[in-house]
Amino acid sequence: MKINNSNFKFVSLNKNKSNYANRGLGLESDINLSNEYYRINDIAYIYKKPTPIKLVNVDYKVGKIKEAYFETPSTTDYNGIYKGKYLDFEAKETNSKTSFSLSNIHSHQIKHLIDVKRHGAISFLIVRFNTLNETYLLSTDLLEQFIKNYERKSIPLSFFKEYGKIIKVKYSPRIDYLEVINNLYFGGN
Amino acid sequence: MKINNSNFKFVSLNKNKSNYANRGLGLESDINLSNEYYRINDIAYIYKKPTPIKLVNVDYKVGKIKEAYFETPSTTDYNGIYKGKYLDFEAKETNSKTSFSLSNIHSHQIKHLIDVKRHGAISFLIVRFNTLNETYLLSTDLLEQFIKNYERKSIPLSFFKEYGKIIKVKYSPRIDYLEVINNLYFGGN
């Protein structure tokens, strides 16, 4: 099976190895295109981290990996710098029309978002509801509050609608999540 | 050839695929152990980015990578947050006793260090002279000045001695580069 990097990137969004189709590619490529736009215009330097791979069999003579497996990332997928601030976030998609299951995020990733926030980072979650074609930004503060105050293992869409911020889909940048960050953390300036 | 992750990490320091032995492992594992110490003690959250892999053949049924190749990273190896600041650096080793060849760093990595610095990051280079067992921290400012003012394609050891900061090797953290950052950027507090 021949695949290219964009396939790889989309794979890297799928923590569970099932249902590669219809998940990941859309949001991730939107974010990568937006980050490219931010870099080209010297607005921010934010990158997606490569997916960690566990190497099992490598031919170093030709630098060829013959056997390897996807590993669980120890942190979030994206980080970088914007307006002097450390930015860190995880991006997920769901096909549910009603809620986002927290099982989509590893607990150590949530811990990471909280840890870096405590140290002064702007950290958040980007969640896209594929079937509704709505993308929300949810700050780590709100994510923490939800986990603290609710028994539920999934965040209802209504919570995103009430407390999250919707991210507009444009031509360029594809999804201008820094516009939301600007309003939330920099008074829209 | 069976190898484990630590091998992988050490491979990932070697941008040229030659001479895997005696290079990389020392400094990289020192930095990884130090970053772990910083995280455990809630001092800083700095991680090494996984090496990007170009996938060619993957069996998604079992999540097994059957053919892949190492790619050139688009950014530096390490970034994270310390005292509310975005930190970004590249770490390299040299077996030379007299100088560090700039051919060890990709030009786009130097550009990245300069770009993030311009946006408020603390960015720098960590260079270890293996044969001397001396490790230096060189800020991006100094790296830029050297490139601007000298024709030379390699930075002499004397430049590191005069302008760089030596990083002490301790028991824990192995190399306390944040102590140097503290003195350089936070007045030692």
Image (spheres, coloured by chain):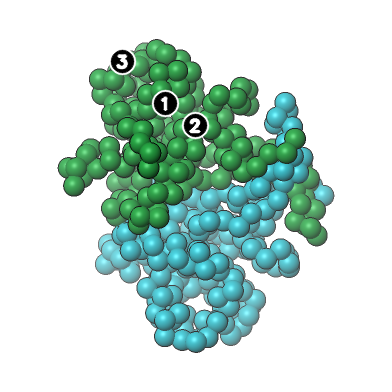
Chain colours: A cyan, B green
Q: Residue at x 64, y 54 (%)?
A: A71
Question: Counting residues from the N terminus, which is met first, the one under dot 1 or under dot 2?
Answer: 2
Q: Is residue B109 visible?
A: no
**Alpha carbon separation for disc pair 1 and 2:** 9 Å
Is the Cβ of the residue at disc 1 closer than 8 Å to that at disc 2? yes
* Mark 3 residue element: helix
Determine which residue is flagged by label 2. Answer: B26
Q: Position of residue A60 (x, y in %)?
A: 70, 29
The quarter of the picture where the N terminus of chain B appears is: top right
Quarter-of-image position of residue A55: top right
The number of numbered discs placed on residues in the rendered structure image is: 3
Question: Counting residues from the N terminus, which is met first, the one under dot 2 or under dot 3?
Answer: 2
Q: Position of residue B77 (x, y in %)?
A: 48, 40
- Looking at the rendered structure, whether the residues under marks 1 and 2 are on a common chain is answered as yes
- Looking at the rendered structure, whether the residues under marks 2 and 3 are on a common chain is answered as yes
> Considering depth in this image, is A128 or A114 the residue closer to the camera?
A114
* Mark 1 residue element: strand
Q: Position of residue B149 (x, y in %)?
A: 30, 18
Quarter-of-image position of residue A17: bottom right
Check the image and report above or below for A52 versus B171.
below
Is the Cβ of the residue at disc 2 closer than 8 Å to that at disc 3? no
Asked if residue B133 lies left or right of residue A36, the reply is left
Question: Counting residues from the N terminus, which is met first, the one under dot 1 or under dot 3?
Answer: 1
Determine which residue is flagged by label 3. Answer: B158
Determine which residue is flagged by label 1. Answer: B128
Give the amino acid type for the residue marked by disc 1 in the picture. Arg
